[in-house]
Image: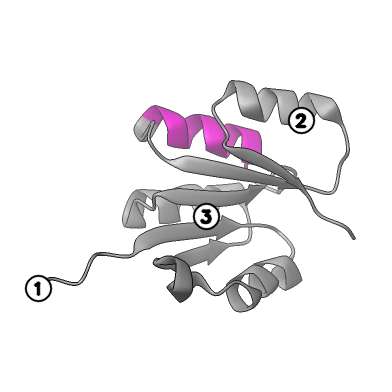
Amino acid sequence: MLETEKMKVLIADDESIVRKGLRTTVAWDRFGMEVVADSPNGQAAWEAFMEHRPQVVITDIVMPEMDGIELSRRVKEAAPETRIILLSCHRDFEYAQEGMRLGASAYLFKNA
């Protein structure tokens, strides 16, 4: 019997503590998932997305080089079935609205 393939996850956040925290505090294996890459900016995340083709992208909205909204737009154009979870320390509803309009699955507020 073949082992089912794990769902691939990409994490994009310019704060290394957030990337490390998400990698280490979530029991990815338990959920049949694995983090295939974590990126410090949107451009690096886009390149990692093209290389790994993850099914889930967890991205900060405000990042250098390419923000999470533009990353989400590109990901959805390339692979509409990809699930996107937006992270932000901004409570600004416009960010959430834009993300949801692009097809994000969730919008999570991260505390400083």
Kind of residue at disc 3: Ala
| Image quadrant in which the C terminus is located | bottom right
Residue 29 lies in magenta, yes or no?
no
Residue 71 lies in magenta, yes or no?
yes
- Which quadrant of the view contains residue 17? bottom right
| x and y percentages locating residue 109 in the rendered image | 80, 48
Residue at horizontal 37 percent and vertical 35 percent from the top: 81
Residue reaching furthest to the bottom? 24
Examine the rendered structure and indicate whether residue 5 appears above or below residue 12.
below
Give the number of the disc on residue 44.
Answer: 3
**Distance from the alpha carbon under mark 1 to that under mark 3:** 36 Å
Which label's residue is closer to the chain start, 1 or 3? 1
Q: Are marks 1 and 3 in contact (CB under 8 Å)?
A: no
Residue reaching furthest to the front? 1
| Label 3: how many Cα within 10 Å (few below 14, some 14–19, many 20+) | some
Of residues 37 and 29, the one nearer the viewer is 29
Residue reaching furthest to the left? 1
Q: Which residues are magenta?
A: 66-77
**Distance from the alpha carbon under mark 2 to that under mark 1:** 45 Å
| x and y percentages locating residue 33 in the rendered image | 42, 65
Determine which residue is flagged by label 1.
1
SS of the residue under disc 2: helix
Kind of residue at disc 1: Met
